[in-house]
Image (cartoon, rainbow, N blue to C red):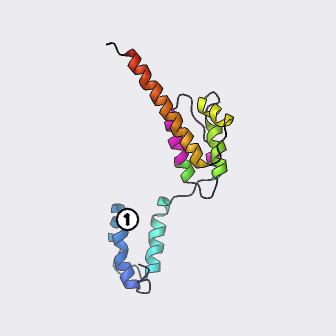
Amino acid sequence: MTVYSKDEALMCKVFPSSLGLIAMRWFDGLKAESINSFHELTQAFGSRFVTCRRVPRSLASLISLNMQEGESLKTYSDRYWELFNEIEGDFDDVAISTFTLGLLSEHDLRKSLTGKLVTSVGQLMDRIDKYKRVKDDQQQGKRKDKVIP
């Protein structure tokens, strides 16, 4: 598209190739000669589909995220990292502390993270994965104990 950015007619013809089903339906419904330029086309598209834009989340939404009573570490961790990835900026140091503080106060991982601090998001993710593996191994051990030979 950048190569042909001076050729507005071509850009208008190529534009639909990037659309999904709903947007294509909108495009096909445009009246003939109702759009006079590529700029007008992008403005009309933006006006119609403004609600589809993702608004970056604020750091406050990450700070307020907490593990729920009875929630698994996997579920909390998945929610946390999904939200973290929606925040623009470099907040690795905040990620470490907010993830830890969001865990239930009696959670063993929280105790571990406050006892032996991690200094990067990579270390935090490694520690979470290690904790999950240990818990999975413990769960499998309990299941084996219950099996009657």
Tell me, yes or no, whether the highlighted magenta stretch contains residue 76. Answer: yes
SS assignment at label 1: helix
Q: Residue at x 49, y 37 (%)?
A: 74
Q: Quadrant of residue 97?
A: top right
Q: Is residue 119 magenta?
A: no
The residue labelled by disc 1 is 23
> In which quadrant of the rendered view does residue 64 lie?
top right
What is the x, y in percent for residue 8? 41, 84
Name the amino acid type tagged 1. Ala
Q: Nearer the viewer, residue 132 or 54?
A: 132
Query: Foreground residue, 10 or 46?
Result: 10
What residue lies at 36% left-to-right and 83% top-to-bottom? 10
Please say if 122 is above or below 132: below
In the image: residue 66, left or right of residue 143: right
Name the residue at 47% across, 25% down: 138
Q: Is residue 89 above or below residue 137?
A: below
- Left of 14 or right of it: where is 118? right
> Vertical placement of 69 versus 99: above or below?
above
**Res 111 visible:** yes
Start-end of magenta stretch: 62-81
Residue 5 in picture, x, y percent from top left: 44, 83
Q: Residue at x 35, y 63 (%)?
A: 20
Compared with 13, 63 (above or below) is above
The number of numbered discs placed on residues in the rendered structure image is 1
Q: Residues within 10 Å of mark 1 (few under 14, many from 20)?
A: some
Q: Position of residue 128 (x, y in %)?
A: 54, 39
Q: Nearer the viewer, residue 112 or 50?
A: 112
**Image quadrant occupied by the C terminus:** top left
